[in-house]
Amino acid sequence: MNPDFAAPQRQSKKGIIILALISYGKLLKSFWFVVLYILYKQKEYTIEILTFLAIISLVFVVVNAHIKYQYFTYEFNFEGDEFIIKKGVFNKKTILLEKSKIQEVNINQPFLHRMLNIYQLEIDSPGTDKKDIMIEAISNENAQYIRSYLLDKKVAVEENLTADIEEIPQIKISNLSLLKYAVTANYVKSFFALISLLIYFSQQVSKNFNLDLETYLKNEVGYTSIETLSVFTFIAAFLFVAIFGILINVVRTFVVYYNLIISKFAYYLSVEYGLFNTKNQLINNHKVQKISVTQNYFQKKWNVLSLKFNQIGEENSKNNSINILGCNEEEKNNILKFLYREIPVFHTFLKPNFRFIISRTVSFIVVPVVAGFFFFSETAPILLYSIFYSIFAASIIYFSFNNSRLAYNEDFIRKQSGIWDIEQKTLQIEKIQTVTISQYFWQKKSDLGNIFFSTAGGSLKMKTAKISELRNLANYSLYKVESSAKNWI
C-alpha cells in the first residue's frame, strides 16, 4: 500500500505535450481536406492563411491540453478498495472503479511516449461509459504499481497454482517466424483491402478535385476502354496488387508485433510487443474464456500459427482479445499447458450432416444463379459467369463442410471450422454460461439441430448435426457447470 496514492495524483507533466499532440492530430484528421483544398486553389495568400490557421490551432490545443492536465486526477480509496478518477472543468466527472471488478490493466508505450519516457495506462472495467479508462501520461513506476495493486488477487495463492507447474522459459517469437506468418496470413484480406482503398481514393480525388479519371487516362495514357486492355495487363496488375498487399501485411505485422515476448508469472502471462508503439497485455488464466488457434496449409508446413485469447467481455472487442502471431507448435503447447494445466486431447468428434451441403448449395449457388439469369441475362454472358461462380462457391461449401467438426472430452469443447485458414476454438466446459439447442422446421424430419455454447468471452456453435448427440452433450455440459466448484472468472 503506497500512502501517496491516497491523495489525488496528476499525470506526468510531460503529458501536456502528449495531450497537445494527440489533440493536434485529431484536429488535422478532421480538417485535412481544408488544407488540401487551400493548397489546390493556390491563391495569393495561401501560405499566410495556412500559417495563421496552424498557429491558432496550436495555441488552442496547448491550452486545451493544459486544462485537461490540471483537471485530471487519480487516487486510491484503500479502505473501500476503489480506484477513483476525476476529470472535467465545467462538466465534472468522477469515476469509481471497484478493485474486484477490474478486468484488465494494460501498460502501453506508443512512439511519442517512448521519446518522452512515459507510459499509457488502460483500465478495462464493466459499467463505464467507454471500454477503457485511460491515463495518458504516467511514469513506469506508477503504472506498474497501479496495475499490480488492481490485479493483486489471492487466487494464485489459494489454489497453489505454482506448486506443480512445470516452469517454462520466456518465449520470444523470432523475426523469422514472424516473417513466415506475415507472408502466409491475411493475403486475401490485404488484397481486397488494397483494392478497396484504391477505388475509394480514386473516387475521392474525382469528387473533390473535379477530375475526370477516364478523360485523363484517354489523354495522358492513351487508354480508350477497358476492353482494349490485354489479358497480360490484367494478370500483371493483379500480381502487382497481390504482391504489394503481401508487402503491406509484412510491414504491418512487423510494426505491430515486432519483438513479441511472452513472460510467465504466477497466474497470468504478460505479452509485450511493438516496434514503435509498445503494448503490454496480460492473459489471465482465470479470465480466459476461449482460445483460438488458426493455421493454413503453408503455415503448417513452416510450423507457424496464430493464437487468439478471448477474455471476459464482448467476443469481437479488441480490448478483450489478445493475439500471439508466429509461434510454433511447441510454444503453443507450452502456453496451453500453462493456462489449462494440460494440453486438451480429444477422441470424440461430431461432424455436420451432409444436408449441410444441400442447404448451402441452395442458398449460395441456386438462388444467386437463378437471380442472375432473371436480372442480367440480356446484359452479360451470364452462363459463363454462372459456371465460374458455381465452381468457386461449390469449392468453398465443400471445404467448409469437410473442415467443420466439434470435438469434446470431459473438460473441453473444441470447434474446428474454416476453408483455407483452419480455426480451432477451444473453451472449458466449466466456463460455459448458456447452452442453446435449436431446430428449424425442415430439420425435424431428419433429426438434425444446432447447438450454441456461450461464455463471457465468446461462443461456439455447431449446425446441422444429429440432435440426439447434441442433447447429450448439452446435458453433460450443464451438469459439469452445475457440479463444478470453480469460478468461471
Image (spheres, rainbow, N blue to C red):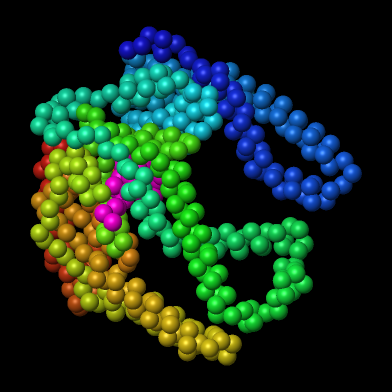
Task: Name the residue at 23% across, 44% down.
Answer: 331
Quadrant, the N terminus = top left
Residue 112 appears in the rendering: yes
In this orientation, which residue lies closer to the viewer: 408 or 140?
140
In this orientation, which residue lies closer to the viewer: 23 or 257?
257
Instruction: Give the quadrant of residue 55.
Output: top right
Residue closest to the far right:
44
Instruction: Give the quadrant of residue 165.
Output: top left
Task: Name the residue at 60% across, 61% down.
Answer: 198
Q: Position of residue 326 (x, y in %)?
A: 32, 48
Q: Is residue 269 magenta?
A: no
Q: Is residue 4 above or below residue 202?
A: above
In this orientation, which residue lies closer to the viewer: 464 or 373?
373
Task: Name the residue at 76% across, 30% down.
Answer: 56
Instruction: Give the quadrant of residue 349.
Output: bottom left
Residue 215 appears in the rendering: no
Q: Is residue 306 magenta?
A: yes
Q: Position of residue 80 (x, y in %)?
A: 34, 17
Quadrant, the C terminus = top left
Q: Position of residue 390 (x, y in %)?
A: 39, 82
Range covered by the magenta-colored residues: 302-327
Asked if residue 243 lies left or right of residue 298, the reply is right
Asked if residue 212 lies left or right of residue 378, the reply is right
Q: Position of residue 19 (x, y in %)?
A: 58, 28
